[in-house]
Image (cartoon, rainbow, N blue to C red):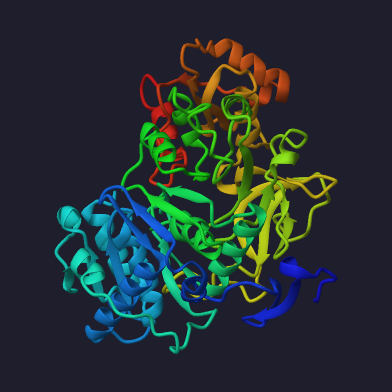
Amino acid sequence: MSSHQSGPDALVEEHVRDVPVRCYAERPHSVVQVLEEALSSFGDSVLLVDPARSTSTTYAQFARLVEGAAMTLRDRGLAPGARVAILARNGLEAAVAIWACARAGLVHVGIPVDSPAARVDALLSLTGADLLLVQPALRDRVPPTAIPVEDATETLLGRESAWQHGRALPEQDTTYSLIPTSGTTGHPKAVQVTGRMSGHAAAFYARTFGLTPRDRTAIHLPFAWVSGHVTQLTPAMLSGGSAVTMASFSAPQLVAVSVEHGVTWLDVVPSIWELLLRSESFSLPALAGVRLAVFGGAPAPPGTLDRVRQRLPQLRLFDVYALSETCAPVTCLHDAEALRRPGSVGRPTPYCELRLVDRDGRDVPRGEAGEVWVRSAAMTPGYWGAPPGPPDGWLRTGDLGRMDGEGYLHVGGRSVDLIIRGGVNIYPAEVERALLATGLLADAVAVGIPSAVTGQNVGAAVVARPGVEADPHLLQAAVREALGAHAVPRPLRVTDALPRNSNGKVDRVAVLAELTAPGG
């Protein structure tokens, strides 16, 4: 469907796997195209700063490394579509690997660096990797394997070659990267990423944030996730900006890097806000240059965001609802909307369609809860090695949500996390919001506790704000007042920190185990 819009936000209808979707009329079709077009305008500008090496790399230098690494990979005799796994910390190698694989027609497989050997082995087997590139310092993470294993630094940075402008660019629906999911169920999956997906993400971020060549981001989230290259480096490259890579994360280090290297925008998961607030330097005037931040992946406590705004009043905050399966945001709550839409993750982005559906597959009325279904131009063609996505193009996210009268989405958690007590549905996110609204807590999670009488009861684990005593009775009373006696968490445990998985999300299985353990 053609839009009446004009300019960069104009939309057109295109068919992807026989499904009509709304697309940006103007967007890049591959990360390789983004780099090639940036060379003409920003060739001598700095693209990457790598503090671990004390080096800066210009667009032109990066392109020569990508072209050289692509030639080296092709020299290995890898056929188009072969999978090249990378085990490397954030830095120049991790970035070159992605672009070199795309340039050579190969498929990049990012292995999270905190993966134990068994997890590495599972991901190599899942993706059918043909080659594994490993930084020498991470060699002990590699299990015995039949596939070739090479030094990532030598293979990716050992050769430079002039960029070949006449070479064909990748097709936009070709898979160029596989992003492992968190695998909290014990069955890891690998999301296929195409140029259409990363192109829409880059266009959305660059336009929504108004990125310019003066902007710089700090990449501390792993390149093996969507965040590293899809939502940060590619938008930065599209706008002629730059990025600082962080080999590991700590809140004081992120603040120090932002100050030293003139960072202007951040991408974080919500759990990081509280860690940043513990740093005295997370304030003015030290971070006066940081003008915006985007976050998503889990609810952010309103009180936490209030304190972030108090520390950095110039900071514009964007809350996005996104999945690895979509790459680009599904919804976005703009900073100007946040105060009047607490608890919302915003309205659908231009290239996304949303449905809220009941258990029988019927759309629910506005205001009622249902499972969130998404159809998007930035949708993955499927998981590697699994059947393709649904033929109607609708991704069943497994997330529960409701849409208010003005089209703002409120996400209530995973459908598998829904607590049913005596036949009454209790949404964990609502319990968590009631607990956090007391202002006593830095973090909270609610889970279903098995019960022979009611089926499930509500349990909760909470983390008090520094210097604050969190009285469980006061917290339970707050939930009772907000939601009713049926939603009061018993047990409620105050703990120093909530267990989290490698993506920064609360590990609800671990929380349940702690609450149901003797003495929990």
Give the answer, above or below, for where 131 lies relative to 278. Answer: below
At horizontal 50% and vertical 11% (from top left) the residue drawn is 468
User: Residue 172, percent across and down?
Assistant: 54, 79
Residue 420 shows in this picture: no
351 displayed left or right of 57? right
Q: Viewed as shown, does residue 47 lie left or right of 391?
A: left
Q: Residue furthest front?
A: 44
Q: Is residue 286 above or below residue 95?
A: above
For the image, the number of numbered tags is 0
From this view, report whether residue 250 is shown above or below residue 405: above
Seen in the picture, residue 447 relative to 74 is either above or below; the reply is: above
Residue nearer the viewer, 115 or 447:
115
Residue placed most toward the observer, 208 or 441: 208
Q: Is residue 457 left or right of residue 340?
A: left
Is residue 380 something that shows in the picture? yes
Question: Residue at left 48%, top 28%?
Answer: 282
Q: Residue 341 in the image: x percent, y percent?
A: 75, 37
Q: Quadrant of residue 16?
A: bottom right
Q: Position of residue 283 (x, y in %)?
A: 51, 26
Q: Residue at x 35, y 60 (%)?
A: 57
Residue at the spot 22% in from the left edge and 83% down from the top edge? 76
Q: Where the N terminus falls, by quadrant?
A: bottom right
Q: Position of residue 247 (x, y in %)?
A: 31, 48
**Quarter of the image where one finds residue 140:** bottom left
Q: Nearer the viewer, residue 128 or 247?
A: 247
Q: Quadrant of the C terminus?
A: top left
